[in-house]
Image: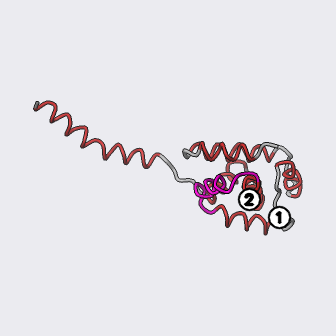
Amino acid sequence: MKRRFVLQCVVLAALPSLNIVAATAKSPASVSDLTRELMLGLSLPQNFVIAATGALLNIARRRLAVLEFSDISGFLPGTLPLLHQAAQITSAGLPSSIGEMPNLVARFGLPVDTTNSCQEFILSYLRERDGRKIAGLLRSAWRN
């Protein structure tokens, strides 16, 4: 009886420290972190990263249900301001389909496969932050 009590105390004492480790292991996602990491990770110009991320999120906004896109914007705080900033940078409007992305990439003088690299980076960023559902929503929105 005494041994069980001691074991319960040990387990209960360890739980708070386990929760702290689990909480600090996860990094919250945000659009500003995503764009910064995308810019550094792929060595892309800042204006392009903002425009491309905004364009890819705009495609999702147009192709997904309102509630699905609200899941994305809730998981990635700062999404709506980024869409406005991206629209200002492009000044010609944001693409509404993946098929329009090569035009945006070309305006920045970047290789055509840059869109694919950006997509994969964004999906990886989300998965690393427990955003598998969000990554799945984006992947489905980005299909041609």
Give the residue drawn at x 72%, y 48%.
42
Q: Position of residue 98 (x, y in %)?
A: 82, 48
Three-letter amino acid code at the position of disc 2: Gly
Three-letter amino acid code at the position of disc 1: Thr
Q: Which of marks 1 and 2 is nearer the N terminus?
A: 2
Query: Alpha carbon of mark 1 to alpha carbon of mark 2: how far?
Result: 10 Å
Observer-nearest residue: 33 or 138? 138
Q: Position of residue 62 (x, y in %)?
A: 76, 56
Label 2 crowd bin: few (<14), some (14–19), many (20+), radius 10 Å: many
Q: Give SS at disc 1.
A: helix
Count of numbered circles in the view: 2
Q: What residue span does the magenta drawing correspond to?
A: 63-78
Query: Are the residues tagged 1 and 2 within 8 Å (C-beta)?
Result: yes
Q: Quadrant of the N terminus?
A: top left
Q: Where is residue 53 in the image (x, y as percent from the top left)?
A: 73, 55
Observer-nearest residue: 117 or 143? 143
104 vs 31, left or right, is right
Give the residue drawn at x 77%, y 60%.
51
Residue at the disc numbered 1: 90
Residue at the disc numbered 2: 54
